[in-house]
């Protein structure tokens, strides 16, 4: 058996971080077993589905490296097939026509509620022949639910789950307007796409028993089901915007790396020993659904940020430079070829201190633009008359220095020794002059990246 999984979002809004984890688990499971990971856009809710949401889902998955192995399937395009299967069940006597009116359905619900029963269709058309008054009138098609016994699902995460068939209703599989219901369409699509494993949130578990009715009635082999717990906020409540970012692209905008987000989501509900940093190839090697826990996970943004810092330090400098320059451009920072080159030269030092690309861009801005940097208030306070005099003297000293990182560090040490002061008394005013801040990469790295002319220009400007 070739493993085939699918991620099946509805395009009614942005891709939630919980949905991204579901996609990740589907992709990893398929790739671990040498199978295929597919995408189905469940766009049958025509009133709420939008092309913008479809585009956002595809963009989010591409950013995470979770694009499917085959072109996406759009559920709405398969309505004729869904209707065909419904009519086949009708022809086999495993489904029936229902002419119950909206008013009758409302009356059934109200009566059941008043009697303390679940509001459920009373099966009045299950074994009833239509009369002349039904002729030409629209009807829904309902599946015949089993009347006794129980339905058993051997879930790969939740274990064996049982529901008495008395709890199941004769659900509609084809509405009176000819459109299929979601629970029916999903089964037909999963069967036709040869899906072997349905991995999804445990909020779908109750749907599974109703979907099994369609599999069993058609004589189709059920896929393996795995219902993974949801992600909650730190307070245990359902994850929402009040907890922080929840859209996948929100995390991108806030400067997180996709590999860090994937690694963090992987560890929400799945684990392998004490391994915290699990790159993609390692995750494919290790991942199996049997290691997913049954308890809900809690989103910890601080832990994600810490993990992102680890991945930043491992990331390619050219890639980070491109992303930082893109952010600086959006912020209106003007820079040319020289500014871009300076950011690239400083990247090995800059990324050691940052936790997100947004932070990285903030710390790199001083190197990108030309001329004296904007001064932070705290930094400006360090430019005392004594510090300015030191900067004038230091500029003349550095004018003769060889402009290489190691040489510049030694020249600064020699200057401090000659003047009989601590290196910090030299480096801190110099740092302020060059970066406009009290923090920066090592000062010799900053001098080297800025170059002799730009460095001296900034030092003299600060001294004045």
Image (cartoon, rainbow, N blue to C red):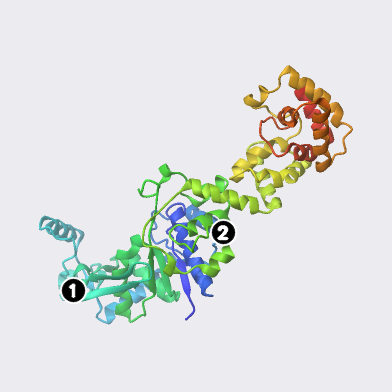
Give the camera-side residue of 227 and 82: 227
The residue that label 2 is drawn on is: 62
**Marks 2 and 1: which is nearer the front?**
2
Give coordinates of residue 408: x percent, y percent.
82, 38
- The quarter of the picture where residue 158 lies is bottom left
Instruction: Using the image, determine if residue 235 lies above or below residue 287.
Output: above
- Residue 244 figure quarter: top left
Say if residue 464 shows up in the picture.
no
Question: Left of 366 or right of it: where is 285?
Answer: left
Numbered disc 1: secondary structure: loop
Residue 154, position as x, y percentages in the image: 33, 73
Residue 456 lies in what quarter of the image?
top right
Q: Spot the residue most to the right.
A: 400
Residue 387 vertical position relative to residue 138 in the rendered view, above or below: above
**Badge 2 or badge 1: first in the primary sequence:** 2
Q: Residues within 10 Å of mark 1 (few under 14, many from 20)?
A: some
| Residue at the (49%, 45%) spot, across then down | 302
| Mark sitting on residue 80 | none
In what quadrant of the picture does the C terminus appear?
A: top right
Label 2: how many Cα within 10 Å (few below 14, some 14–19, many 20+): few
- Cα distance, mark 2 to mark 1? 47 Å
Q: Please say whether residue 113 is visible from this viewpoint.
A: yes
Residue at 79 percent of width and 26 percent of height: 420
Q: Residue under circle 1? A: 126
Determine the residue positioned at 45% across, 62% down.
270
Task: Tally the marks.
Answer: 2
Relative to 122, is 199 on the left or the right? right
Q: Residue 455 location in percent, x, y?
A: 80, 32
Discs 2, 1 touching: Cβ within 8 Å: no
Q: Secondary structure at mark 2?
A: helix
Name the one closer to the observer, 383 or 421: 421
């Amino acid at each position: 058996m070739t493993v085939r999984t699918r991620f099946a979002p509805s395009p009614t809004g942005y891709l939630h971080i919980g949905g991204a984890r579901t996609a990740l688990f589907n992709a990893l499971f398929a790739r671990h077993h040498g199978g295929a990971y597919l995408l189905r856009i469940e766009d049958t809710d025509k009133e709420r589905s939008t092309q913008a949401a479809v585009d956002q889902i595809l963009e989010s998955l591409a950013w995470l490296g979770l694009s499917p192995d085959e072109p996406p399937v759009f559920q709405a395009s398969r309505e004729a097939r869904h209707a065909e299967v419904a009519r086949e069940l009708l022809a086999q006597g495993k489904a029936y026509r229902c002419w119950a009116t909206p008013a009758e359905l409302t009356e059934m619900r109200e009566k059941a509620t008043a009697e303390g029963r679940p509001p459920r269709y009373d099966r009045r058309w299950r074994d009833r022949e239509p009369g002349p008054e039904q002729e030409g009138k629209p009807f829904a098609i309902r599946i015949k639910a089993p009347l006794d016994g129980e339905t058993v699902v051997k879930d790969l995460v939740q274990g064996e789950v049982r529901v008495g068939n008395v709890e199941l209703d004769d659900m509609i599989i084809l509405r009176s307007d000819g459109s299929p219901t979601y629970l029916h369409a999903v089964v037909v699509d999963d069967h036709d796409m040869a899906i072997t494993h349905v991995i999804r949130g445990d909020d779908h578990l109750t749907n599974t028993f109703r979907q099994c009715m369609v599999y069993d009635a058609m004589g189709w082999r059920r896929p393996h089901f795995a219902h993974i717990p949801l992600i909650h906020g730190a307070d245990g409540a359902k994850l929402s915007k009040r907890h922080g970012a929840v859209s996948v692209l929100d995390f991108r905008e806030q400067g997180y790396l996709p590999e860090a987000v994937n690694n963090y989501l992987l560890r929400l509900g799945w684990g392998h020993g004490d391994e915290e940093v699990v790159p993609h190839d390692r995750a494919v090697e290790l991942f199996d659904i049997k290691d997913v826990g049954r308890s809900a996970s809690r989103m910890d943004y601080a832990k994600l940020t810490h993990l992102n810092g680890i991945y930043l330090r491992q990331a390619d400098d050219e890639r980070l430079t491109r992303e930082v320059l893109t952010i600086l451009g959006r912020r209106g920072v003007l820079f040319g070829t020289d500014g871009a080159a300076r950011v690239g030269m400083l990247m090995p030092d800059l990324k050691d201190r940052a936790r997100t690309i947004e932070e990285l861009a903030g710390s790199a801005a001083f190197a990108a633009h030309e001329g004296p940097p904007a001064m932070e208030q705290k930094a400006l306070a360090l430019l005392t008359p004594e510090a300015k005099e030191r900067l004038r003297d230091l500029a003349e000293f550095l004018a003769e220095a060889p402009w290489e990182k190691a040489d510049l560090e030694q020249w600064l040490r020699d200057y401090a020794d000659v003047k009989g002061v601590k290196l910090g008394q030299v480096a801190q005013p110099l740092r302020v002059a060059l970066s406009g801040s009290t923090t920066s990469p090592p000062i010799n790295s900053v001098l080297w990246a800025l170059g002799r002319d730009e460095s001296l220009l900034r030092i003299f400007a600060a001294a004045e």
